[in-house]
Every structure is written in structure tokens, then in C-alpha cells.
Image: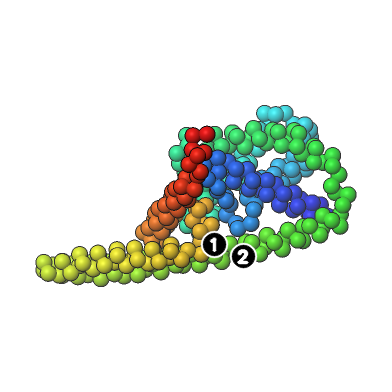
Amino acid sequence: MLVAQYFNTFIIISFAGWIYECLYCTICEKHWENRGFLFGPICPIYGSGFVLVMIFFGYVPFLKQGYNSPPWLVFLICAVMSATIEYSTSLLLEKVFHAVWWDYTNMPLNLNGRISLPTTCAFGLTGIFVVRFFMPFLASLGLGRFAELNEFLALLFMLLLGVDIALTVASLTNMMERMADMQKAFDKRMQAGYELASQAPATVVNAAKNSAIVARNELAANVSEYIHHLPFPDKHHLMNIKAFRTTRYRIAADNIVASFKARFLRERKDAGDDTAGSKDPGQENV
């Protein structure tokens, strides 16, 4: 029953984290941003951190004051915990999918772009509010009394989360395989050009140059075809992935990201032009 309650809390806070991420990024980018690794409206990293903090301050023996621990201690624990979760999650996603979903490279005092001092301090300060005020309030609600409801919701959320994870991983794997196939075709053509060029005569070198041009044109055509018929899952991933970090299909990935961003910006511009063109001329200066 306690496990079910913690799992439900994980889902609810993950949903709240998704709302925060979407609102923050929408305000910064000035257009709707559906953030998150998964398709569903949750950011599990928030829920994981929240539940770990609950367990830490509720059960760790040396924290005798629990939720009433000194603010400086709460800040320190929450900051270290958030940095650990954020760094390890970023590293895991990169190792598995060769991509990063956030990048703090442009922020001061960052570590490999995975974490930064400003964001870590922000999580630490948020932790003070969460531990000192929100968690006691949550405990006062006595939600543990509804054992059957908690277990039912936990099973339902677990089913939905499992389906979401399976669909996300399957679509990401499929997208990476398509990129790898494009890269493989490009590399094969470039290798053939290199082998021609190594034979030295000028005519052969020109043929090698033509082979390289053909390879780039083929890659551009494949990328254009892929972007033109872009499936919704792939669009979701490309909207959220900040960068690809791989040598396996780096050229194909970079071309796809560049083409996708160009198309996205063009669609936004066209939508803006359509909105401006549909205005009532009589209302222009109102």
C-alpha cells in the first residue's frame, strides 16, 4: 500500500514537472513546447527526485528532525540529489540513444552540459519549500487511508506508463535505425569515391569528386523525403532532443535536425503570415 502511494505521488509530481517544463519552455521560445522524453504528459525525473526526497527525509535515521530539518541542510541535500539524478539520467539517455534532451553548455559553471550550478541551486531552493511546507501538507491529507483507491490508481498508472515507455523506446529505436541506414548509404558512396581518388589519375580524381557530390545529394534527398513524411513520434523526439552525440550516424542526424528546424521555422512563419493576413483591415490600428 505504501509502495502504491509513493508510485502515485511519483506520477502526479512527474505530471506537475511536465506542466512546469512546458510552460517555462513555451515562454522562453514564444511558441508551444511539448517537453519530455516520453509521449505522455510526464517528466519522470521530477517525480523520481520528489519521491527520493520524501523517503530520505522520512526514513533516514540521522535526519531526526525530518521535514523540520534546517533549511541549509535541506538545500544541500536537495541540490546534491538533484544534480546526481540529472547528471546520471542525461548520461544514461546519451549512452542508450546517443542524444541529449537538455544541454547546459551555455550556462555558467556547467559540468559537461549535463548539470550547472544555477539550475542545481534552483532545485535546492525549491527543495526547501517542498520539504518544509509541501510535504507536511501532503502528509496531513492522510491519503494513505484510501488503500484500495491508491492500489487501483497505481496499477492503472503503471499500465499507462509501461505502454508509454514501450512506445517511446520503439519509436526512438526506429528513428535511430533510419538515421543509421542513411549514414551507411552515405558512407558507402564516400568510401567508393575515396577508393577511386586513391588511384591518382586526374580523370579518376574527378570521378571521385562526382561520387562525393552524388553521395551528398542522395543524403539530402533521403533526408528531405524523411522530413516530408515525418511521423508524429519522430517529430516529438526531434522537437525535444537538443543534440545528437554519436559517430555512428552524426552526419545524417545533423542533416535531419537542420532540415527539421528549417521546416519548423518556415511553418511558424507561414502560420504567422496567415494570421496577419486574416486580420480585419479596419482593426489594424485599434
Kindly identify the residue that appears in the image at 48 percent across and 41 percent down. 281
Q: Is residue 26 shown left or right of residue 255? A: right
- Crowd around label 1: few <14 · some 14–19 · many ≥20 (10 Å): some
Amino acid at circle 1 = Pro
Secondary structure under tag 2 reads helix
The picture places residue 18, in percent across and down from the top left corner, at: 63, 48
Kindly identify the residue that appears in the image at 65 percent across and 38 percent down. 78
Q: Is residue 124 above or below residue 180?
A: above
- Residue ID for mark 2: 166
Which disc number belongs to residue 199?
none
Kindly identify the residue that appears in the image at 25 percent across and 64 percent down. 213
Amino acid at circle 2 = Ala
> Quarter of the image holding residue 208?
bottom left
Q: Is residue 23 above or below residue 220?
A: above
The picture places residue 135, in percent across and down from the top left corner, at: 76, 39
* Front position in the image: 70 or 228: 228
